[in-house]
Amino acid sequence: MEYETKSHCKYLIALHLILVVKYRKPLLNGNLGEFVKKTVFDVSLSSDFRIEEIEIDKDHIHMLITIGTRYSVGQYARRIKQGTTTKIWKSFPYLKNQFWKEKTFWSDGYFVCSVGNASAEIIRKYIQEKG
């Protein structure tokens, strides 16, 4: 991971972000899991963050992302959740049977911790071994 340089600052903001499927339903296997990974990459292309590593488990997704200074961490998490949920519901209509009350996919919260440049490799290996 490289430092970013703007006109008045130089930074490296790396985060370990975990999003959990609503009610911890084990839905992220097979086609849906791969679709979610691809969709997160698509969201990152139109947003101010970069995915360094990403891996799915049956009911949650781990990401190592680097972000800019323009938005808060919560705004990045919200953008990922909103972008993926919309595409998931369009592509997998059978989810009506799983979430019958509302068009949701992710639980309300998320886990995030900052990753220093020295420990980024440890987080990277941890994420690669998940799933």
Image: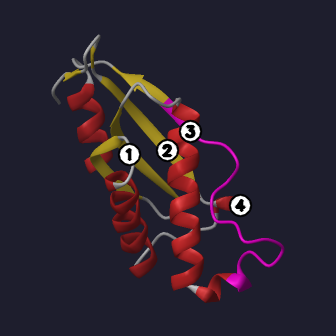
Q: Which residue is mark 2?
A: 18
Describe the element under mark 3 as helix, strand or loop.
helix
Q: Secondary structure at mark 2?
A: strand
Mark closer to the observer (3, 2): 3
Which disc is residue 75 wearing? 3
Residues at badges 1 and 2 in contact (C-beta under 8 Å)? Answer: yes
Task: Indicate the amino acid at tag 1.
Answer: Met
Task: Point out the tag, 3 or 2, that comes first from the N-terminus.
Answer: 2
Which comes before the other along the chain, label 4 or label 2? 2
Whole-percent x and y of residue 70? Answer: 44, 28
Q: Quadrant of the C terminus?
A: bottom left
User: Which callout, 1 or 2, points at the residue further toward the start of the chain?
Assistant: 2
**Direction from residue 34 to residue 92 in the image, left or right:** right
Q: Main secondary structure of the magenta part?
A: loop
Viewer-nearest of discs 4 and 3 = 3
Q: Quadrant of the N terminus?
A: top left
Q: Is 39 above or below relative to 129? A: below
* Discs 1, 3 touching: Cβ within 8 Å: no
Q: Secondary structure at mark 1?
A: strand
Marks 1 and 2, Cα distance to the nearest angstrom? 6 Å
Can the viewer see residue 131 in this picture? no
State if disc 3 and disc 4 touch (CB < 8 Å): no
Q: Which of disc 1 and disc 4 is earlier in sequence?
A: 4
Could you tell me which secondary element the residue under label 4 belongs to? helix
Quadrant location of residue 52? top left
Chain part drawn in magenta: 96-112
- Answer few, some or many: residues within 10 Å of disc 3's Cα (few below 14, many 20 plus, some between 14 and 19): few
Dot 1 or dot 3, earlier in sequence:
1
**Mark number for residue 63?**
1
* Residue at which label 4 appears: 23
Q: Residues within 10 Å of mark 1 (few under 14, many from 20)?
A: many
Type of residue at label 3? Gln
